[in-house]
Image: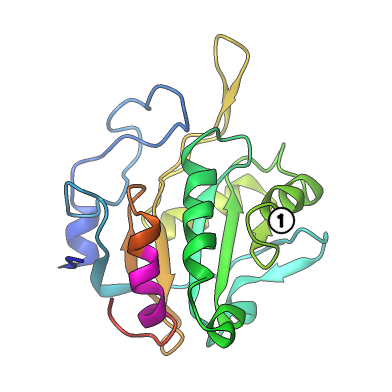
Amino acid sequence: MRTTRVTVAALLAAAALTLTGCGSEPAKPGSVTQISGGQSSGKAATLLDRPFTKPELVLTDTTGKPWNLREQTKGKPTLIYFGYTNCPDVCPLTMSNIAVAKKSLPKADQDNLRVVFVTTDPERDTPESLGAWLTSQDPAFTGLTGDFATIQAAARSLGIGIDPPKKEADGSIVSMHGAQVIAFSPKTDEGYVLYGEGATVDDYTKDLPKIAKGENP
């Protein structure tokens, strides 16, 4: 698997891209800046020369209790994704790909890995509904919901754009969001690898053993 190495500055300097609407028409170009994976295929890992700092983020988990991202994932290999449970395609596929790939890890690495799904549609994604949705993917996945502004700020600190959910003409509600997965190292607690929405089960299966150890995929 090919790996591209780029700087955060180069990513953020890229032209504004469209957000993922999960089955809807894309947002207008330029509405928000989204990180580019740096490859047309979107299937290879992007290594960041200047890793992201893990956001200071405290939200509500699926049990209804406060969950501190930094405290709960300190020293753990962590994958973070922003999406919503009513998404008909990209979000469930991304979580499914990670869930399948995770099963190929040794049991100890599976237990140590943290996969965090942060909703971009907190009004509809209650702790209960979010928990039920994630359980169907992997019961060990962590789901977080809470104040939209807090979630949006955390996403943007990682170069991921999300817009407030909006109602379409047909009455459906769409949440436009960047579809990147960011991997944080257990050694540094920094986000050093990025995946686009095109990342496959094979991509994650090949890379997770190294991410589990804080190595470059």
Q: Main secondary structure of the magenta part?
A: helix
Foreground of the two, 152 or 67: 67
Q: Position of residue 58 (x, y in %)?
A: 66, 66
Q: Position of residue 28 (x, y in %)?
A: 33, 25
| Image: 55 above or below 130 | below
Could you tell me how many numbered marks the image carries? 1
**Where, quadrant-wise, is the C terminus in this rendering?**
bottom left
- Residue 122 coordinates in the image, percent (x, y): 68, 43
Q: Residue at x 51, y 61 (%)?
A: 100
Q: Secondary structure at mark 1?
A: helix
Q: Residue at x 41, y 64 (%)?
A: 182
> Going 28% across and 33% down the picture, which residue do you hit?
30
Left or right: 7 in relation to 150: left
Say if residue 179 shows up in the picture.
Answer: yes
Q: Is residue 6 visible?
A: no
The spot of residue 38 in percent (x, y) is 18, 54
Q: Residue at image x 49%, y 46%?
A: 93
Task: Left or right? Give the position of 44 relative to 21.
Answer: left
Queried whether the magenta region covers residue 205, the answer comes back as: yes
Circle 1 sits on which residue? 135
Picture quadrant where residue 141 is located = bottom right
State how the image is colored: rainbow
Out of 154 and 44, give the one closest to the viewer: 44
In this view, the residue farthest toward the top is: 169
Q: Amino acid at mark 1?
A: Thr
- In the image, residue 118 sits, relative to residue 167, either above or below, namely below
Quadrant position of the N terminus in the picture: bottom left
Q: Is residue 193 left or right of residue 96?
A: left
Give the magenta range. 204-211
Write down the quadrant of residue 126 in the picture.
top right
Q: Is residue 21 left or right of residue 8?
A: right
